[in-house]
C-alpha cells in the first residue's frame, strides 16, 4: 500500500508538471462522462415516470374489437348484449366482461359549453387512480343505468372554476342530465394527457348505452388469474361467432402485455442513447493513450534510471498505469458533477411532464466511476506495458 501511495504521488507530480497538456486530455473525459451520466440519468428517470404512470392504471385486461380488415365488418359489430353472452358462455375463465364506449359529445355545465371525451366505466375497479373528491360508480348505479358521472380535474376547472365545487352539480351530456359524484386527481403524466386528453368524463356503461344505443367500441374482458391470452382469444371469439356468424373476425389484445413492451422499449432507447454518448468516452480514452505514449517517450531516461537502480518491470507498469487511471478519474469526477447537474435540471422538466420520476443515483455514480476506471486501465495498459518493456541500457542512452 505504501508503494502504491508513492506511485500515486509521483503520478500526481507528473500530471502537474504537464498540467496544460493534462487539462486538455482530462477535458475529453469530462465531456464523455457528463454526456453519459446526463443521458442515462434523464432516460432512466423518464422511463420510471412512464412506468409509474402506466402502473397507476392497473391491469387493463383484454380488449376485443371488430377486425376492420374483414369482408363485412358491419355484420360483426359488437352489440351491448354481447357482453352478457360472452360472460355467461365463459364464466369459468372470465371474471368480468363489460362493453367499452368512447365518444365526443357536447357537454354543458354552469353555463359553459364544451366538446369533450365521454368514456364508459363500471363498478369493477382495478386501477390505482385516486379521487380528489367524491366516489366511484357503484354496482347499483351500473345495474340501473343511473345518470351519474365522474370528471377529470381539468374538466372540473373548466366548468366550475378552481374552487372545486363539482360534487352534486349537473352536467348535460348531449342534452342528457348527469349528476357529478366524483372528481379524479389530476394526472401528472403529461404525455398521456396529450395523447388521451385530460378533459374527460366517465359515466356507467349502462347509461352510455342509453345515450348511444347501437354497436359498442369493444369488449373489456378481465380473465381469472393465470388465463393465457390464447385461451381468452379463442373463448371470446367463439362466443361472438356463435352470435354473429362463423366468418366474423375479431382482434383480441392484452393491454398489460402492451404496456410491458412499451416500458421495455423505453429502456432500450434509453440505453441505446447512452451507448451513443459512450462514444465520447472512447475518444477520451484514445486521448489518454496518446498522452501516455508521449509521456513514456519523454521520460525514457527516467525509466532507464529506475530500472538501473533496481526498479522492476512491474513497478514501471504500475506507475504509468496508475497515472493513466488518475487522469481518467479526474475527468470522470468533474464529468459526474456536470452530469448530475444536468440530470437535476432535466428532472424538473420530467417531473412536471410525467409525474414522480425516481433518479437511480446509485447506478449513475457506479457507472461514472466504473467507466472512468475502465477507460484509464484499458487505454493506459499499452503505454504502461511499453514503458515496462524498455531496455534500461537503451533507455539510459536516449
Image (cartoon, rainbow, N blue to C red):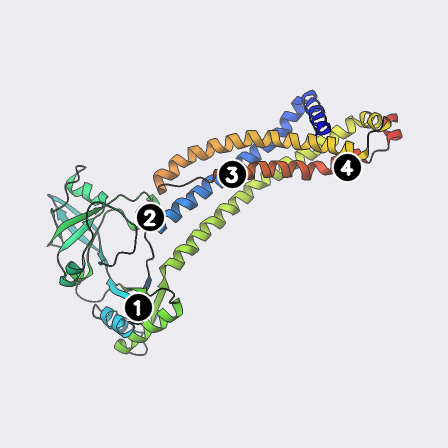
User: How far apart, in angstroms, are the residues tagged by discs 4 and 1?
Assistant: 69 Å
Q: In the displayed structure, does residue 320 sit left or right of residue 108?
A: right
Which of discs 2 and 4 lies nearer the camera? The answer is 4
Tag 1 residue: 94
Q: Secondary structure at mark 2?
A: helix
Q: Secondary structure at mark 4?
A: helix
Q: In the displayed structure, does residue 104 sit left or right of residue 47?
A: left
Q: Residues within 10 Å of mark 4 (few under 14, many from 20)?
A: some
User: How far apart, in angstroms, are the residues tagged by discs 3 and 2?
Assistant: 27 Å
Q: Nearest the camera: 397 or 166?
A: 166
> Who comes first in sequence, dot 3 or dot 1?
1
Which of discs 4 and 1 lies nearer the camera? The answer is 1
Image point 30% across, 65% down: which residue? Answer: 221
Q: Which label is found at residue 364?
A: 3
Image point 42% across, 53% down: which residue? Answer: 262
Answer above or below: position of 66 versus 58. below
Tag 4 residue: 385
Give the image location of residue 320, x and y in percent.
73, 31
**Can see residue 398?**
no
Q: Residue furthest front?
A: 1
User: How far apart, in angstroms, are the residues tagged by discs 2 and 4?
Assistant: 56 Å
Q: Residue furthest top?
A: 17
Amino acid at each position: 500500500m505504501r508503494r502504491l501511495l508513492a506511485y500515486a504521488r509521483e503520478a500526481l507530480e507528473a500530471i502537474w508538471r504537464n498540467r496544460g497538456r493534462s487539462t486538455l486530455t482530462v477535458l475529453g473525459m469530462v465531456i464523455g462522462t457528463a454526456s453519459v451520466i446526463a443521458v442515462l440519468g434523464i432516460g432512466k428517470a423518464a422511463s420510471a415516470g412512464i412506468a409509474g404512470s402506466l402502473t397507476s392504471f392497473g391491469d387493463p385486461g383484454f380488449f376485443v374489437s371488430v377486425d376492420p380488415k374483414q369482408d363485412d365488418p358491419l355484420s360483426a359489430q359488437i352489440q351491448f348484449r354481447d357482453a352478457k353472452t360472452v360472460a355467461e358462455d365463459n364464466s369459468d375463465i372470465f371474471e368480468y366482461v363489460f362493453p367499452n364506449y368512447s365518444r365526443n359529445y357536447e357537454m354543458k355545465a354552469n353555463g359553459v359549453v364544451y366538446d369533450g371525451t365521454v368514456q364508459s366505466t363500471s363498478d369493477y375497479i382495478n386501477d390505482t387512480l385516486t379521487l380528489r373528491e367524491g366516489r366511484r360508480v357503484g354496482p347499483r348505479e351500473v345495474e340501473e343505468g343511473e345518470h351519474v358521472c365522474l370528471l377529470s380535474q381539468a374538466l372540473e376547472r373548466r366548468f366550475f372554476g378552481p374552487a372545486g365545487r363539482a360534487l352534486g352539480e349537473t352536467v348535460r351530456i348531449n342534452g342528457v342530465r348527469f349528476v357529478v359524484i366524483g372528481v379524479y386527481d389530476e394526472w401528472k403524466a403529461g404525455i398521456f394527457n396529450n395523447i388521451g386528453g385530460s378533459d374527460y368524463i366517465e359515466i356507467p356503461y349502462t347509461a352510455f348505452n342509453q345515450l348511444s344505443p347501437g354497436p359498442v367500441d369493444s369488449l373489456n374482458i378481465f380473465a381469472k388469474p393465470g388465463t393465457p391470452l390464447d385461451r381468452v382469444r379463442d373463448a371470446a371469439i367463439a362466443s361472438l361467432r356463435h352470435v354473429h356468424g362463423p366468418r366474423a373476425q375479431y382482434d383480441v389484445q392484452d393491454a398489460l402485455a402492451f404496456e410491458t413492451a412499451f416500458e421495455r422499449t423505453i429502456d432500450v432507447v434509453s440505453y441505446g442513447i447512452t451507448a451513443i454518448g459512450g462514444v465520447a468516452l472512447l475518444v477520451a480514452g484514445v486521448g489518454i493513450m496518446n498522452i501516455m505514449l508521449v509521456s513514456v517517450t519523454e521520460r525514457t531516461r527516467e525509466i532507464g534510471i529506475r530500472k538501473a537502480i533496481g526498479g522492476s518491470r512491474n513497478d514501471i507498469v504500475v506507475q504509468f498505469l496508475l497515472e493513466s487511471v488518475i487522469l481518467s478519474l479526474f475527468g470522470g469526477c468533474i464529468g459526474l458533477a456536470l452530469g448530475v447537474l444536468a440530470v437535476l435540471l432535466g428532472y424538473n422538466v420530467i417531473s412536471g411532464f410525467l409525474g414522480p420520476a425516481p433518479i437511480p443515483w446509485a447506478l449513475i455514480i457506479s457507472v461514472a466511476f466504473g467507466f472512468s476506471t475502465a477507460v484509464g486501465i484499458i487505454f493506459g495498459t499499452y503505454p504502461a506495458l511499453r514503458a515496462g518493456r524498455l531496455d534500461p541500457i537503451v533507455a539510459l542512452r536516449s
